[in-house]
Image (tube, coloured by chain):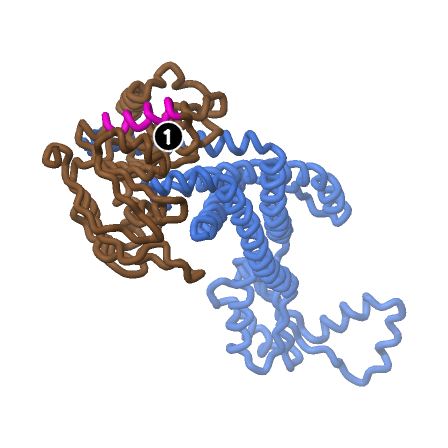
Chain colours: A blue, B brown
């Protein structure tokens, strides 16, 4: 019965069928501008919000990495100084990953402390030196992981020493960043679920408007796949539109917040340029919009065609 | 082509639309189905097109037992059937040619081939000059003819028509029925429900009479063998 049974003919018919479905869904979107604009805007907002939060997190991380901070590990030892101290310092110096080792004798530490006091005579009340000897270690690598590993290594080497790193804040910031990413992920997932359901409802409503065409098509032998095809294209169109809107929104928001953030960084004495969205982010937004649009349309059409 | 064996259709509300109906229509035959409204004519046609399922009994169409036919097999089955409705059921959001092209679109015809067939179908029903018209601008008779063109454009083996002349004057009704006779002459099997007894009795074709859901068992053969 079907004359287009040859392969090329089948492909042509298939392409025609798809282009026709796409054309019709575009026509339908254009002829319902109010609804289309609302859906595209909602999708745009929902995509732009997590994208902006992500940008903030990434910038915060860039900020912490940008601070030129030499991590310092201090070992407080229960000895006065002398050979015991220099020997220990030499042992630490021989460890791999150590850039520099400075040994400070207890007396030298006290002398330095005395100088920092407004009234050095106060220390004369002390019977003996309460300060421990200190060995300061500068690790070669500055990443929080490397510093933590070095701390661990020193603690095992000298179990009697108290090991304190001034790099703790970097680790805290990193932990905050990881927690922020997790929160962002969960919020994004909830937003994605919400917008997908909204798109599904819209798609189902559109299919119900086509009920006469669907009834006739079914009688003529249309499969569900054929019937939902225009809706799927409609979902993809909304998705791309939403992705583009979110990009524009993101651009506007970044533009509005860039200079105050950079000024604040200057006040803190940190040279910092707020990084805007890159091409990768744009692709991600449009891609996510596309996927959410398709899933929404698929869910909605499945529900509408079952009725 | 069509075989019904002791078919009963009872609706949810308890009314029995068809009772124990048996019927056989051979390939290439044309028969009319008459009876007062509510006699079960539409139900019978809908059962044959698998738009309804029987409560009891067996239906075979074109050698295919509809009993075990799965839902996802229904579209493919219906592609061999053309359906004409009393209210034409045209889509008013698109021109005449797009209405007629709908079955070809579903079947995946190439555009050039589809256009050719649409024009041929419209030519057959005498509406070629209206191919770009909007259905709303057509008269009732023209709309019905568009509906018929849509039903036959994919050259189905079986044509089912439910009161195709219901809203038309006698002259137009005769023209429409003549169209069905023409399609039958080229091999299309047709079952046409109509209560226009006066008109169909002049056509010399078998008439099946449904009353209260009952039908005298009949075997309709090709016109050549009945004379």
Extent of the magenta region: B170-182
Count of numbered labels shown in the rendering: 1
**Relative side of B94 to A244, left or right:** left
**Up/down of B184 relative to B171, above or below:** below
Tell me the residue that label 1 is attached to: B147
Magenta-colored stretch includes residue A25: no
Crowdedness near tag 1: few (<14), some (14–19) or many (≥20) residues, C-alpha within 10 Å:
many
Q: Residue furthest left?
A: B225
Taking the image as drawn, is residue A29 in sight?
yes
Q: Position of residue A104 (x, y in %)?
A: 66, 70
Residue drawn where x is 38% and y is 31% of the image: B165
Question: Which of B203 and B182 lies nearest the eye of the viewer?
Answer: B203
Q: Secondary structure at mark 1?
A: helix
Tell me where residue A174 sits by quadrant: bottom right
Viewer-side residue, B175 vs B93: B175
Q: Position of residue A253 (x, y in %)?
A: 68, 40
In the image, taking residue B88 as reference, residue B69 lies left or right, namely left
Q: Is residue B171 on the magenta stretch?
A: yes
């Amino acid at each position: 019965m079907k004359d287009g049974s040859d392969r090329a003919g089948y492909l042509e018919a298939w392409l025609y069928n798809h282009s026709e479905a796409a054309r019709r869904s575009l026509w339908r979107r254009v002829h319902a501008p109010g609804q289309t604009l609302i859906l595209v805007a909602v999708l745009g907002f929902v995509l732009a919000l997590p994208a902006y939060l992500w940008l903030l997190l990434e910038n915060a991380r860039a900020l912490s990495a940008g601070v030129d901070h030499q991590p310092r590990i201090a070992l407080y030892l229960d000895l006065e100084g002398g050979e015991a101290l220099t020997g220990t310092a030499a042992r630490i110096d021989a460890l791999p990953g150590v850039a520099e080792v400075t040994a400070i004798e207890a007396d030298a530490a006290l002398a330095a402390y005395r100088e920092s006091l407004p009234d050095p005579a106060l220390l004369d009340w002390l019977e003996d030196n309460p300060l421990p000897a200190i060995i300061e270690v500068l690790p070669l690598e500055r990443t929080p992981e490397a510093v933590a590993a070095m701390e661990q290594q020193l603690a095992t080497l000298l179990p009697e020493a108290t090991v304190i790193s001034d790099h703790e804040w970097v680790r805290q910031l990193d932990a905050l960043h990881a927690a922020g990413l997790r929160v962002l992920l969960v919020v994004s997932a909830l937003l994605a679920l919400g917008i997908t359901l909204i798109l599904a409802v819209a798609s189902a409503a559109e299919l119900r408007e086509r009920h006469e065409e669907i009834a006739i098509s079914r009688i003529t032998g249309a499969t569900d796949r054929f019937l939902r095809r225009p809706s799927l294209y409609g979902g993809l169109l909304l998705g791309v539109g939403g992705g583009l809107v979110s990009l524009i929104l993101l651009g506007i928001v970044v533009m509005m917040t860039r200079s105050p953030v950079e000024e604040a960084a200057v006040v803190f004495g940190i040279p910092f340029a707020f990084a805007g969205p890159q091409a990768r982010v744009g692709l991600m937004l449009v891609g996510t919009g596309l996927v959410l649009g398709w899933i929404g349309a698929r869910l909605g059409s499945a529900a509408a065609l079952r009725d | 082509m069509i075989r019904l064996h002791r078919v009963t259709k009872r609706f949810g509300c308890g009314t029995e639309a068809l009772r124990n109906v048996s019927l056989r229509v051979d390939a290439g035959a044309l028969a009319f189905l008459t009876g007062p409204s509510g006699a079960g004519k539409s139900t019978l046609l809908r059962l044959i097109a698998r738009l309804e399922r029987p409560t009891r009994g067996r239906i075979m169409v074109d050698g295919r037992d509809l009993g075990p036919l799965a839902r996802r097999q229904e579209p493919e089955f219906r592609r061999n059937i053309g359906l004409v409705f009393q209210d034409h059921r045209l889509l008013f959001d698109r021109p005449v040619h797009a209405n007629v092209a709908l079955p070809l679109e579903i079947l995946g015809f190439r555009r050039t081939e589809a256009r050719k067939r649409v024009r041929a179908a419209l030519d057959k029903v005498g509406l070629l000059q209206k191919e770009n018209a909007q259905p709303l601008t057509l008269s009732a008779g023209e709309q019905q003819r568009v509906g018929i063109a849509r039903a036959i454009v994919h050259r189905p083996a079986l044509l089912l028509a439910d009161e195709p002349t219901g809203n038309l004057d006698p002259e137009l009704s005769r023209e429409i029925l003549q169209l069905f006779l023409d399609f039958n002459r080229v091999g299309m099997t047709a079952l046409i429900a109509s209560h226009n007894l006066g008109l169909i009795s002049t056509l010399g074709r078998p008439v099946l009479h449904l009353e209260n859901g009952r039908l005298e068992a009949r075997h309709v053969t090709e016109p050549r063998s009945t004379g």
